[in-house]
Amino acid sequence: MVDAIALLDMCHSFADCVASNSSVWSRPVVSDSGNLAIREGRFAIDMVQNITGSRDEYIPNDTFAGPLSNFTFISGVNGGGKSTYLKQIGLIVILSQIGSYVPAEEAFVPLRDMLCTRIGTGDDFEHNMSSFMLEMKETSYICDSVMTEESK
């Protein structure tokens, strides 16, 4: 009974999110393999604009990654939206795989069993690590995880 109520609550939450949002959400096409293609994808959590009262609108982004391109390097100026872009892609992939509509005009998403990204800056004073050391350690973990997954 609890599982049925939880599933109903999740489906209601998905429907409420899509229906109450002013931007377009679409049904993604999920496949076993192929390209990741997102047309005019947006960050799923656009309530920040409503809370802050910002008049700037989020600019939709297109994303394409072929089956052989499993690594992407994104660079840019501070405050340029790199982290938001990565979170946007991650949320779209996760939402599509759990059966929800996604904040995009169109989305083709292959099944994934792992999403790896390195987002964030700052020192870790508790473990006596500089931001550079922390970045290198996290990047090493991502590379090791990807290599371990590819060897399976």
Image: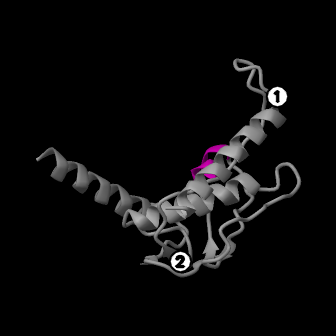
Query: What amino acid type is highlighted by mark number 2?
Result: Ala
Residue 107 seen in the figure: yes
Query: What amino acid type is highlighted by mark number 1?
Result: Ser
Q: CA distance from mark 2 to mark 1?
A: 38 Å
State which tag comes first along the sequence, 2 or 1. 2
User: 10 Å neighbourhood of mark 2: few (<14), some, or many (≥20)?
Assistant: many
Q: Nearer the viewer, mark 2 or mark 1?
A: 1
On the picture, is 102 further left or further right than 98?
right
Q: Identify the residue shown where x is 53% and y is 64%.
A: 92
Pick out the residue farthest to the right: 77
From the viewer's side, name the closer residue of 58 and 106.
106
Q: Identify the residue shown where x is 70% and y is 65%.
A: 71
Q: Identify the residue shown where x is 89% and y is 54%.
A: 77
User: x%, y% of residue 33?
Assistant: 49, 79
Q: How is the image coloured?
A: one colour
Q: Are marks 2 and 1 in contact (CB under 8 Å)?
A: no
On the picture, is 44 further left or further right than 10?
right
Residue 43 seen in the figure: no
Q: Determine whether the residue tagged by mark 1 lies in a helix, strand or loop.
A: loop
User: x%, y% of residue 48?
Assistant: 62, 48
From the viewer's side, name the closer residue of 37 and 80.
37
Q: What is the magenta segment's predominant secondary structure?
A: helix
Say whether residue 50 is magenta.
yes
Q: Which residues are magenta?
A: 47-52
Q: Which residue is mark 1?
A: 130
